[in-house]
């Protein structure tokens, strides 16, 4: 499905969606989101991969939710974030 979207069209939209995280301080949160989503929201494996305590991971995910105004318990929000991250590297 990602192949249906062109990078030239999707990247600007993704950058707008992720704007609150696209600064120096947000780099850690972007990586956190990528790893956490890549581990299907599993706390322990994602925390281990990031080299942080699971509470630190939870705090980062809460910060991402707050900054983006989303609830990552919602599958639509997770999917939107995953897609945006796929177009912003």
Image (cartoon, helix red, strand yellow):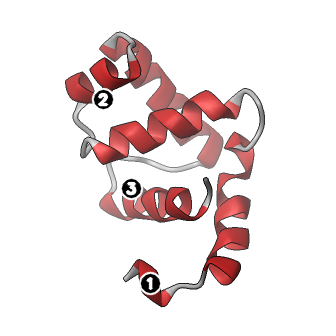
Report x, y in % for residue 2.
Answer: 43, 78
Q: Which of label 1 and label 2 is nearer to you?
A: 1
Q: Which mark is residue 81?
A: none
Name the residue tied to disc 3: 78
Pick the front one: 38 or 55: 38
**Sequence-wise first label, 3 or 1:** 1
Q: In the picture shown, does residue 33 fall above or below 45?
A: below
Question: Which quarter of the rendered picture does the N terminus lie within?
Answer: bottom left
Distance of mark 3 from mark 1, alpha carbons? Answer: 19 Å
| Residue in view at x 44 percent, y 84 percent | 3
Report x, y in % for residue 45.
Answer: 22, 27
Say few, some or many: other residues with alpha carbon within 10 Å of mark 2 (under 14 / 14 to 19 / 20 or more): many
Q: Which mark is residue 46?
A: 2
Report x, y in % for residue 85.
Answer: 53, 56
Name the residue tied to disc 1: 3
Q: In the picture shown, does residue 21 fall above or below 80?
A: above
């Amino acid at each position: 499905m990602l192949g249906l979207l062109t990078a030239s069209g999707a990247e600007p939209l993704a950058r707008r969606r992720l704007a609150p995280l696209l600064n120096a301080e947000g780099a850690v949160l972007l990586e956190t989101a990528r790893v956490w989503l890549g581990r299907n929201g599993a706390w322990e494996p994602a925390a281990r991969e990031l080299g942080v305590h699971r509470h630190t991971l939870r705090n980062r995910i809460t910060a991402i939710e707050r900054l983006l105004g989303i609830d990552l318990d919602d599958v639509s929000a997770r999917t939107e974030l995953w897609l945006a991250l796929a177009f912003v590297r």
